[in-house]
Image: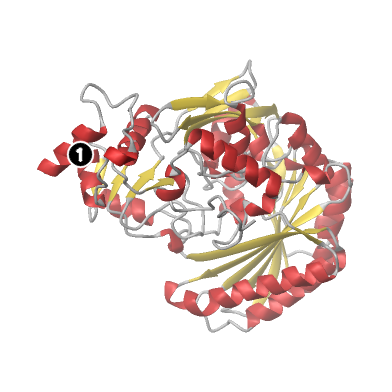
Amino acid sequence: MARCRALLQLGATAAALWGYSVLPLSMVTAAPTPECCALLAQVFPGDVSPRGTDVWTFENEDFWSATEIRNPSCVFLPDSTEKVAQAVGLFVANECRFSIKGGGHSAIPQAANIDDGVLMPMKLLNTTEVDLEAGSIRAGMGLLMRDIYQALDPHNLTAMIGRYEKVGMGLTVGAGISYFFNREGFAVDNVLNYEVVLANGSVVNANQTSHRDLFRALKGGNNNFGVVTHATLRTVETEGAVYGGVVYYPESSIPQVTDQIYDYHTRQAVEDTLTHVLPQYGYNGTSNESIAFCPVIYNRAVDELPEIMRGWVDTPYTQSTLKKRPYADLAFELHDGFPDRQVQEQRVFTVYADADLYRDVWAAYHSWLQQWQHIPGLYGLHVVMPITQNSLVASYSKSSNVLGLNDNLTNNQTLGVLYFGLTMDSMDDTAEILPAHAEFVQSMIDLAKSRNLWHPYIMLTYSGWDQPAIASYGPENVAFLYEVQAAYDPTHVFQRLVPGGQKLPEPGSW
């Protein structure tokens, strides 16, 4: 404990850790993680839970995917930006490894958790401040999407955020597709301000007039530049309700559903930007059955789908939950049936919209999945999401991001984001199936390339752990991100001490 006191004195001024001044690394002795936890506990005695406690157990297991359940040395639960800033200063001064957890909705191991480090959930940064005059909502990064919808629904407002109620705020630094995506663009481009704790423990606001380089870098740059504690999001008016739900289709209707998917990508989403559909194919390995199920949304308070979307209900279906409802209710409806703490794997790539390719990719995936029925609890999910020219124009008219899609502003071609997801019961099966899954997805990338339909963009929020999402933004954007890193994190704290998630690519690898 004497060493811990010495490190505490070394790492902080005694008066107040707010405004933490970080010592040069050459003067700092790195602390083993248990000592980092002891340092935290001295400063925040009520906010640190050691390994094995009830709080530690709950927070370590409170993830969408079992791949995120790790073995942190302790859990630190800050309830203010000031505490985050103090902690980051302490971490940096003592070379403590840590992780940043928002909603915990990633399948990438250690994206939001860590082995032998400090797990820092943001869940107590959970306030909302609706500014009706400014047309915005200030949201803590510990909020889930349901919290934001519930805060905005009474005002007949919504924000460009995730569509499922238990998804967290990480999409605001990744990309982000909302119900209004076709009209309003990516979630990152509807962020008006990021409140960020930097590597030196200082707090800045990054926006269009202050720290503009950091503001742009965060729009796709993930956790590589600081800890975002609050984001101010643009809001838009609604009609007080939305018409939407999920339509479920039998396997016999899948060919017609595929036709609808292509029509949605190239006509419905283009001609009426209030449309939104999230087309999904599902394969159940236990029953060897396939279905399609599609959240179908029209962003108006109507009582039925408009004519342009009628194909989704003219196609034979087994069940529909379509109705007029608040956005919060829709977010809960869409999330229903997606349990937490199963083993999840996800991969993604992007193509130019093509009906034959969409059809062939699902047929190939279905065939591949059937080879793995012996994996307990196997479920395969394939999702096909459009990025239309309208959505890109909306995004880039509001701000500049680093996603590398600005070249598609003028070519009038819809992009298709192809998602491949696996669910299974046990981590024991991952060594067998996950490498094969990576090979299969690569074979589909090769197929798209052979037809001149492949696009290099990899959507970070759906990417696999070894997919080069940030490198896919292109050399110019990656070079810009390195410039921002040099300005705001010259000692690479958020590469070295925060190892999880999609990091900046190694120099020369892109």
Front residue of 386 and 189:
189
Quadrant of the drawing holding the C terminus: bottom right
Q: Is residue 263 above or below residue 488?
A: below
Q: Residue under circle 1? A: 7
Camera-nearest residue between 325 and 167: 167
- Residue farthest toward the top in the current orientation of the protein: 133
Task: Return the x and y of residue 15 as percentages of the image width and height.
Answer: 22, 21
Q: Position of residue 61 (x, y in %)?
A: 37, 57
Residue 263 lies in what quarter of the image? bottom right
Q: Classify the position of the N terminus by image quarter.
A: top left
How many residues crowd around disc 1 within 10 Å: few (fewer than 14), some, or many (20 or more)? many
Q: Could you tell me residue 308's position as x and y percent? A: 88, 48
Picture residue at 73% right of the left edge, 41% below the top? 181
| Residue 15 visible within the image | yes
Residue at the image point whose x is 53% and y is 51% from the top: 503
Residue 188 lies, with reference to residue 253, above or below; the image says: above
296 or 137: nearer the eye?
137
Tell me: residue 210, above or below residue 161: above
Res 379 → quadrant: bottom right
